[in-house]
Amino acid sequence: MPHTFKTGLSLAFALVLACGTALSAEPEHGHAPERAAPRQGEPHPGPRGYERPAEPKGWNTRPANFDRGAYQHNYQAARSFRVGPYHRPPGWTSHHWGFGEILPRAYWGPQYLLADYWLFALEVPPVGYEWVRDGNDAILVNTDSGEILQVEYGVFA
C-alpha cells in the first residue's frame, strides 16, 4: 500500500507540473498585446563576502568635476539588501527608470534619499547629485533638474 501511495503521489505531481507548464506557455496565434522587453542592466561587480561597511573616508567629499560618460549606465546590482518596505509617492505607479530620463520631484524627496549610500555598495555621488530609492532600485539623480545619471537595479530585495 505505501508503494502505491508513493507512485500515485509522484504521478499527481508530474501531472500538476505538466499542466502548469502547458498553461504558462503563450498561444502561438493569440492576440495578446506585445510588451516592450524590460531594460536589463550591465553586470556590476559588488562586494565579496560579508564585510561590515564602514563610513568611507571622505564620504562627504564629493567630486565637483566628473566624467558624465563614466556614470551613464544602468547596472544590475551584484548584491541585494533587505531594508524594509518601500512606499511609492501617493498617486504614482511603478516605472522602470533608466539614465537620461527625468525623475519626478515626488520620487526624490527627503524620505527617499539614500544618505548612507556606502552601506549599499553605491558610489560617492558627485556634487549636485543624490542617490534615491525607487522600489528595488537605487537611482542617482540631479537634485536641480531631476535628470537620472545612473541606475542600479535590484539593490533592495
Image: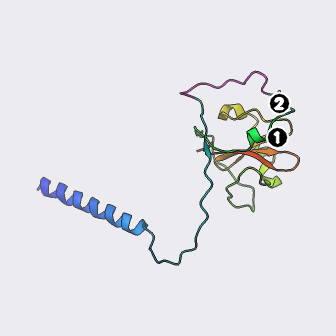
Point out residue 103 in the picture as x, y percentages from the top left corner: 78, 53
Residue ranking furthest to the top: 57
Point out residue 97 in the picture as x, y percentages from the top left corner: 70, 53
Q: Which residues are magenta?
A: 48-59
- Classify residue 68 as left or right of residue 81: right
Q: Does the segment drawn in magenta span residue 146?
A: no
**What's the mark number on residue 56?**
none
Q: Is residue 150 visible?
A: yes
Label 1's element? strand
What residue is rendered at 87% in x and 50% in y?
A: 145
Q: Nearer the viewer, residue 79 or 135?
A: 79
Quadrant for the N terminus, please: bottom left
Mainly helix, strand or loop, the magenta region? loop
Q: Which residue is mark 1?
A: 129
What residue is rendered at 66% in x and 33% in y?
A: 121
Above or below — where is 33 with respect to 121? below
Point out residue 110 in the picture as x, y percentages from the top left corner: 81, 44
| Count of numbered marks | 2
Quadrant for the C terminus, please: top right
Q: CA distance from mark 2 to mark 1?
A: 9 Å
Instruction: Name which quarter of the figure residue 88 lies in.
Output: bottom right
- Classify residue 108 as left or right of residue 3: right
**What's the mark number on residue 62?**
2
- Classify residue 52 as left or right of residue 5: right
